[in-house]
Image (cartoon, grey):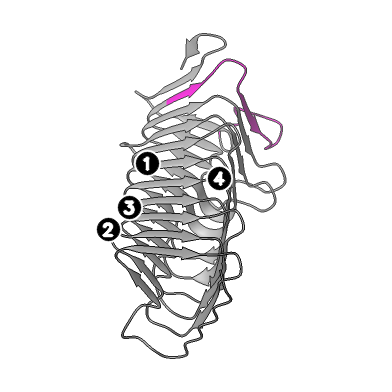
Amino acid sequence: DVPIIKESNGGTQGFIINNSDTVILGIHDTILAKSTGKFINNQATGYIDNSGYWRFSSGSNPIQNAGLFYMRPSSSMKGKNINGHILDNSGMFFNEGCIEYREYGGNIVNNTNYFENTGSVVSRKFSGTFFNSDTILNKGVIELDTSNIGLTNQAFFLNDTAGKIYADFMQSGISNSSTGQFDNLGEIWIARDTGIGSNGLENAGNFKNANLINIGQHGPVFTFALENTGQFYNEDLAQIIININDQILNPQKGILNSTGASFCLLYTSRCV
């Protein structure tokens, strides 16, 4: 737990940390790096436990994790101007701290195994998405701004009771694919501050809302607030608030439920 400052301005050959065993970084441990091809690599046998302060910019793929990785509550990782994914996770990743990036090309999280967030993930001005093809549990805050699709789910995503997801100023807020199971026990806010160019929420798989979905509080939605081509269940006492011309079933801006799909309002035991 001693201060560590490592600056790089051009190295591309090796990682700043390439771990196959154990790395523990305390709250005073600092890594500053820029213009570096590689940052942190945690191999399948590796364990990283970070409580420190990281700033990575003008490089590529800040974290590649295939092992076990903890970002503790005091930790933060911030930066901009990155090529590739910010977190490319094929292992077990637990974020209790803050991950915040802007102005980059790639996914803020590219998850193909297990990712759990009890801290915050903030992404602005990026060309990718928050991507999941395995398992994500969100108990914290995910804030996505200025992208094409904010969040893309192809497997299992649980937004737990304390979880909050915000998506603003992008083409589509959340996309749940035909293979996706998305359970919302927390809050989802789409177009809370700025608009959505296409659909607010797109569901082609199974989507369950057990708490709150709010679309268009202050920003416009230019196609449909909610487009359902799969199975959508709004459970007892759950809310879907669509703030567009005060019409939840406005044919141009409300809910589009395709033929053969199911949109169920469970408190009325009615599916359409």
Question: What residue is drawn where x is 70% and y is 41%?
Answer: 217
| Alpha carbons under labels 2 and 3: distance apart | 10 Å
Question: What residue is drawn where x is 57% and y is 66%?
Answer: 52
The amino acid beneath tag 4 is Thr
The amino acid beneath tag 1 is Thr
Residue 6 vertical placement versus 220 (above, below): below
Quick check: is 237 in the magenta stretch?
A: yes
Name the quadrant of the N terminus. bottom right
| Alpha carbons under labels 4 and 3: distance apart | 17 Å
Res. 135 in view: yes
Residue 199 vertical placement versus 85 (above, below): above
The amino acid beneath tag 3 is Gly
Circle 3 packing at 10 Å, graded few (<14), some (14-19), many (20+), is many
Quick check: is 191 in the magenta stretch?
A: no
Judged from the image, the secondary structure of the residue bearing numbered disc 2 is: loop
Circle 4 packing at 10 Å, graded few (<14), some (14-19), many (20+), is many
Q: Is residue 145 left or right of residue 82?
A: right
Question: Which numbered disc flags the more N-terminal residue, 2 or 4?
Answer: 2
Residue bearing the label numbered 2: 45
Q: Position of residue 117 (x, y in %)?
A: 51, 47
Res. 123 in view: no
Stretch of the chain drawn in magenta: 232-251
Question: Which numbered disc flags the more N-terminal residue, 4 or 3?
Answer: 3
| Alpha carbons under labels 1 and 3: distance apart | 11 Å
Q: Which quadrant holds residue 129? A: bottom left
Judged from the image, the secondary structure of the residue bearing numbered disc 4 is: loop
Residue bearing the label numbered 4: 118
